[in-house]
Image (tube, rainbow, N blue to C red):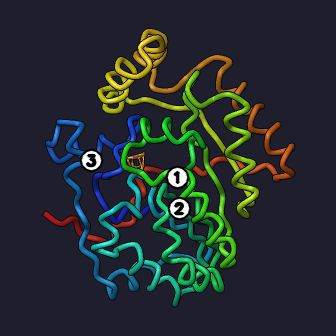
Amino acid sequence: MRSIWTLNPYRGCEFGCKYCYARYAHEFMELRDPELFERKIYAKRFDAASFRAEVRRLKRGDTIWVGTATDPYQPAERRFQNTRRILEVLARESGLDLGITTKSDLVSRDAELLSRVARRNLVRVHLTITTLDEPLARMLEPRAPRPELRLNAVRKLTQSGVAVSVLAHPVMPLINDSEQSLDAVCAAAVKNGATAFSAAPLFLKPCAQQVFFPFLAERFPHLLGRYRERFEKNAYLKGQYPEIIRERVEKIRARHNLARREAPEWPLDDQLELFRSAG
Ligand code: SF4
C-alpha cells in the first residue's frame, strides 16, 4: 500500500491568513497567543544526508506533501532555503509522488529545480489563490504575495514543464464564494497554464476562530453572527453548503474543460520527521 508523508520545513507562518487552521501547532509549544504563530517562526534544522537516507526508505510511489500545515515558501525560505534543499535531494531520487502547497510566488525561484525533480518523479505544485480581488486578498492574507504575483508563478512553473493546480481554498460564505469570483480564479489559472482547479469550504477550529471572528467583527460585522452560529457548534460546515460549492466547482471546471480532480487530502498525523525542530 502506498503511503502519504507530510513535510513542513517551518513551524509558524508569516503570511498570517485570518482563516489559518495551523495556529494549533504553536499551542503544542505553549505559545497560546494566536498572533505568535505569524511572528515567531521556527526553521527546522536540515541535514541532507539524513533526509536522503530517510527518503530512500520510502516505497516507490509513496507521496510526499510539502507544506500541509505551513507555507514552505514563506519569507523565511529566502534565508534558510530548507525547501530548496529538500528539492535538491529529491532531484536525485525517482519514482516518488511530490506535492507542494504554497501561496507564494517564491516557488517560481525553484522552477528549474522542480522540473528536474519532475523528470523522474510525479510533481504537482498547488498554488492557493482564494480571490483575484487584491484588497480582499490583502485583508484575508495580509502578508502573502498578491494574487497577480501568484498567477505569474503559475505561468513560470508551467512554462518550465511543472504541473500546477490552483486551489481556491478556503471558500468563505458570502466573502469569496460567488460563482463569479471562483470562476475568475479558475479562468486566470487556466490562462496561465494550470491544469487543475479545486475549492473547498472553510473550516474553523477554535484556534482559528480566535483570529477569524475578531477579523469579521472589524471587516465584515454583518457576517459575524452567522459565522458564529455555524462554526461555534462545529468546525466544519454542514447541510447544503458543501454540496452547493462542490456543484459550483464542478460547473466551473466543466466550463474551462478541466478534468474532475479532488481536493488534495493528507493525513495530518503522518509527518515525515526529516528535520529536527530548532529551539
Ligand atoms: S499561508 Fe497557509 S500556513 Fe501560512 S498563514 Fe496562510 S493559511 Fe496559514
User: Rounded to the nearest whole Å, what is the CA distance between mark 1 and mark 2?
Assistant: 7 Å
**Residue 70 in which image quadrant:** bottom left
Q: In the rendered image of this protein, does residue 261 appear above or below residue 97?
A: above
Q: Distance between the residues labelled 3 and 2?
A: 27 Å
Say whether residue 91 is left or right of residue 17.
Answer: right
**For the point 46% across and 64% down, which residue is it?**
66
The quadrant where residue 179 appears: top right
Residue beneath the point at 61% across and 58% down: 151
Seen from the viewer's position, the closer of residues 165 and 45 is 165
Q: What residue is rendered at 55% in x and 23% in y?
A: 237
Mark in front: 1 vs 3 = 3
| Disc 3 versus disc 2: nearer the observer | 3
Residue drawn 45% across the image and 20% down it? 234
Residue under label 3: 38
Q: Residues within 10 Å of mark 3 (few under 14, many from 20)?
A: some
Nearest to N terminus: mark 3 or mark 2: 2
Q: Is residue 210 visible?
A: yes
x, y percent for residue 94? 59, 85
| Residue at the disc numbered 2 | 4
Label pair 1/3, CB-CB below 8 angstroms:
no
Asked if 204 appears above or below 121 in the picture, the reply is: above
| Res 228 seen here | no
Question: Mark 1: which amino acid?
Answer: Trp
Inter-mark Cα distance, 1 to 3: 23 Å
